[in-house]
Image (tube, rainbow, N blue to C red):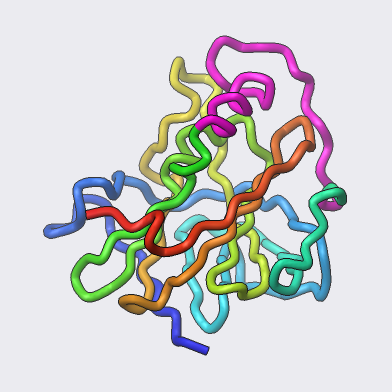
């Protein structure tokens, strides 16, 4: 099992890649279905042997499933469907699902930078107001919850990633990420999943 090396990079850090937005922590702690239950430090994401800790504390209990065995027919416990009244601001599943379905190839990207793999889910965060939860598996590791930032509905651009919202990327061992599986739960409690090979999501 390769070692995963996660780093939280301060927003605006010198030398950071241009695609890394200026973001810090956040967390709607949605639970992902399956077993066993994994107890995780407040507002952390654990994948394999690595840990990434956003800065805003919030209790998080993650339930994981092994490899590809997660059941897309089972809605994660504790989630409640939101009304599907179009807002015009892309804050419901009805509004974002057609976009995310059509752009599935953009859900995740990998960049080799400064001797590490940088794994981005920026695209999903850009449409997160229609989502309840995101889970990720790297190299068939158990699926783990990735906390989703709050939707800023008081603004005209509620999907904007603001300072304090967290980091939509992880840094890992160079060349260590071979496959990535992403599962999303929309706010109408429908679900979708995509699996990617490294060569199909590697960007310059």
Quarter in which the C terminus is drawn: bottom left
Name the residue located 36 percent from the left edge and 42 percent from the top edge. Answer: 163
- The picture quadrant where one finds residue 94 is top right
Q: Is residue 5 magenta?
A: no
Query: Does residue 147 appear left or right of residue 192 in this picture?
Result: left
Residue 151 appears in the rendering? no
Residue 71, horizontal then vertical, whole percent = 82, 57
- The picture quadrant where one finds residue 60 is bottom right
Residue 179 appears in the rendering? yes
The one of 98 and 149 positioned closer to us in this rendering:
98
The one of 24 and 146 positioned closer to us in this rendering:
146
User: From which residue to which does the magenta span run?
Assistant: 76-102
Name the residue located 73 percent from the left edge and 65 percent from the top edge. Answer: 61
Q: Is residue 94 magenta?
A: yes
The one of 140 and 16 positioned closer to us in this rendering:
140
When the figure is inspected, residue 78 is found, relative to residue 170, above or below; the finding is above
Name the residue located 64 percent from the left edge and 37 percent from the top edge. Answer: 131
When the figure is inspected, residue 19 is found, relative to residue 198, above or below; the finding is above
């Amino acid at each position: 099992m390769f070692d995963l090396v996660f780093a939280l990079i301060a927003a605006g850090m010198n030398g950071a890649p241009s695609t890394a937005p200026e973001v810090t922590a956040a967390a709607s702690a949605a639970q992902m279905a399956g077993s066993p239950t994994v107890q995780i430090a407040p507002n952390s994401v654990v994948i394999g042997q690595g840990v990434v800790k956003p800065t805003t504390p919030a209790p998080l209990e993650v339930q994981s499933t092994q490899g590809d065995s997660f059941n897309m027919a089972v809605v994660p416990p504790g989630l409640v469907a939101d009304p599907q009244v179009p807002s015009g601001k892309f804050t419901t599943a009805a509004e974002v699902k057609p976009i995310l379905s059509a752009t599935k190839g953009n859900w995740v990207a990998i960049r080799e930078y400064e001797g590490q793999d940088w794994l981005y889910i920026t695209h999903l965060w850009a449409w997160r107001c229609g989502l309840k939860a995101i889970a990720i598996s790297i190299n068939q590791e158990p699926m783990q919850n990735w906390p989703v930032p709050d939707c800023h509905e008081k603004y005209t651009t509620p999907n904007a990633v603001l300072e304090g919202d967290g980091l939509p990327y992880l840094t890992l061992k160079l060349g260590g990420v071979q496959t990535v599986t992403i599962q999303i739960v929309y706010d109408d409690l429908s679900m979708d999943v995509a699996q990617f090979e490294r060569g199909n999501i590697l960007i310059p």
